[in-house]
Amino acid sequence: MMKIHCLASSSMGNCYLLDNGSSILMVECGLEFTKIRKGLTTENIDLMRVGGCLITHAHSDHCKGAKDLSRYATIYASKQTLERLETSNSKEIYESRVNKLFDSWKVIPFTVEHDIDGAYGFIIKSNDHSILFVNDTKYLEWDLSSYKFNTVMIECNYVDEMIDMNSFKSKRTINSHMALSTTVATLKALDLSECTAIYLMHLSDGNSNERLMIDTVKEATGITTYACGKWGNVYE
């Protein structure tokens, strides 16, 4: 059974753990390494169970801890992302193909619409479990309707009606992050017939409404929906 842990989820830092029972794949390490270690201790997880870390892109809130983490686990990312990181143990992963990581973990990366080169979303597989991971993108261009996902982890950054369309910061957000309406439309385009859980990630501090987002996605999909907390944990 796959277990999902959240150590952080916001523009201040992102870090998620996928536990298949025998090993752990970290996705994003956008915290100082000391905070990652503290989060693992809080979750009662031994760092040595983390075999590797997938990083979506090179913005610091997704890769801040990569240099120190790479002393213990392999960092996996696109060529463009790895070129921006100082890591002692890393491996490039290639778009649109099955990349074997470690243990039973495999990933198929795909390009997403963000404001930095080399940004990826991931189809992650371990044993018989399939996870869609999409963080920091304006929308999902790829047609993933032929895949069946057991778990979906997807950005839901802001509520359309809450954002100030005229501010410079908001314009950047609109052009690089996913709105609630886009998240719902993206989910409806997927085959969710085998999906049992949806995790909403990277909620904006000022332009989100956790309760509204959870309820809207759950109503649209009929699937149990959680929000990943800014400083860890998940909420239903």
Image (tube, helix red, strand yellow):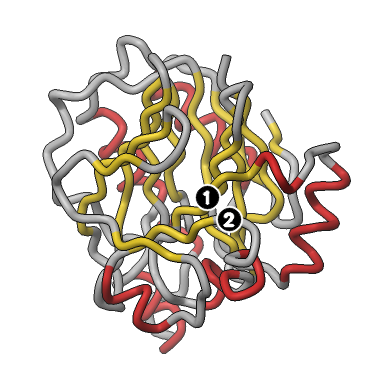
In this view of the protein, can residue 196 be seen by the observer? yes
> Which image quarter is the C terminus in?
top right
Residue 24 occupies quadrant: top right
For image coordinates 27% across by 43% down, the residue present is 99
Looking at the rendered structure, which numbered label has been put on residue 52?
Answer: 1
180 over 130 or under it: above or below: below
234 over 22 or under it: above or below: below
Q: Which residue is mark 2?
A: 73
23 over 206 or under it: above or below: above
Residue 2 coordinates in the image, percent (x, y): 56, 21
The residue positioned farthest toward the bottom in the image shown:
168
For image coordinates 50% across by 82% down, the residue present is 86
In this view of the protein, can residue 206 be seen by the observer? no
13 over 161 or under it: above or below: below
> Which image quarter is the N terminus in?
top right
Number of residue marks: 2
Under circle 2, the secondary element is loop
For image coordinates 64% across by 58% down, the residue present is 72
Residue 155 coordinates in the image, percent (x, y): 44, 50
Viewer-proximal residue among 179 and 166: 179
- Crowding at label 2, few (<14), some or many (≥20) Cα neighbours within 10 Å? many
Q: Amino acid at mark 1?
A: Gly
For image coordinates 14% across by 47% down, the residue present is 96
Viewer-proximal residue among 182 and 128: 128
